[in-house]
Amino acid sequence: MGRNLQSGERLRPVDLARGHGLSTQAIRNYEEAGILPPAGRTPHGYRTYSPLHAQALRTFLALLPGHGHRTATSIMRAVNEGAAEEAFRLIDESHAQLLDDRRTLQAVERALGGLKATGAKADPAVPIGPGGTFIGPLAEQLGIRPATLRKWEHAGLVRPRRDPLTGYRVYDEADVRDVRLAHQLRRGGYLLEQIAPLIAQVREAGGLEPLEATLRDWHGRLSARGRAMLTGAAELDSYLSRRG
């Protein structure tokens, strides 16, 4: 807020909003969502806030980068309702997701290493017969739906050929490689429109450098998320202490 607040000081919505570049409507929305405790009211019905509300706002904004809007909102709502254990559970879930994303990144890096070592052969975890594999077995092996593979094909991530007799999609080794990379990158939070150019470059240039650059960026984003979780935890601890 840019100044020391006394415990009994009354604050207007604009006082909370101004220090964080927010609108007064955003402050009201945060209160209605349970992110802030209920405001006091003047005899004329105007909202009044306190240093506790200012700390709640700082806490929410600190939680956002590490946990995302939905989870940060749920954490604050739980704390404000006196359900601290629920807030801790939500935080644990975010940390578990971060750990899972780190493991996914490691899996992608292993896949990249395997592609280099085998000359861009397909993932050995996906069995492929002499004539290729079909959409059902491939989707089942990767734990995704056939509709997802069709969506990725439409987005240009994979280009299976069609069996001339049945019309079924047939995925060869290169197709399975592309599907596997797309699957891992999607789990890492990349959008289809971000993945398609990477796979196209890998496919057309015969090199994996674009993917390596993506992995470096992914490392940075995970590290930033982990650091943001620490910052959010410190603010949340202060808020819990202030609430008593």
Image: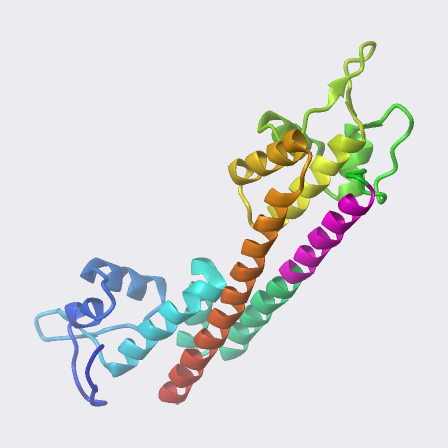
Where on the picture, by quarter, is residue 45? Answer: bottom left
Q: Where does the image place residue 153, in percent across and percent down from the top left?
A: 64, 27
| Count of picture labels | 0
Tell which residue pokes out farthest to the top in this image: 165
Q: Which secondary structure is most common in the magenta stretch?
A: helix
Horizontal side of residue 95 vs 235, given as left or right: right
Where on the picture, by quarter, is residue 210? Answer: top right
Horizontal side of residue 200 vs 69, given as left or right: right
Residue range (magenta): 101-118
Q: Where does the image place residue 160, in percent across and percent down from the top left?
A: 73, 24
Q: In front here: 123 or 154?
A: 123
User: For the point 76% across and 35% down, which residue is it?
Assistant: 176
Q: Where does the image place residue 242, in percent across and percent down from the top left?
A: 36, 87
Q: Where does the image place residue 20, in percent across and percent down from the top left?
A: 25, 67
Image quadrant where one finds the C terminus: bottom left
User: For the point 37% across and 74% down, which residue is it?
Assistant: 59
Q: In front here: 134 or 102?
A: 102
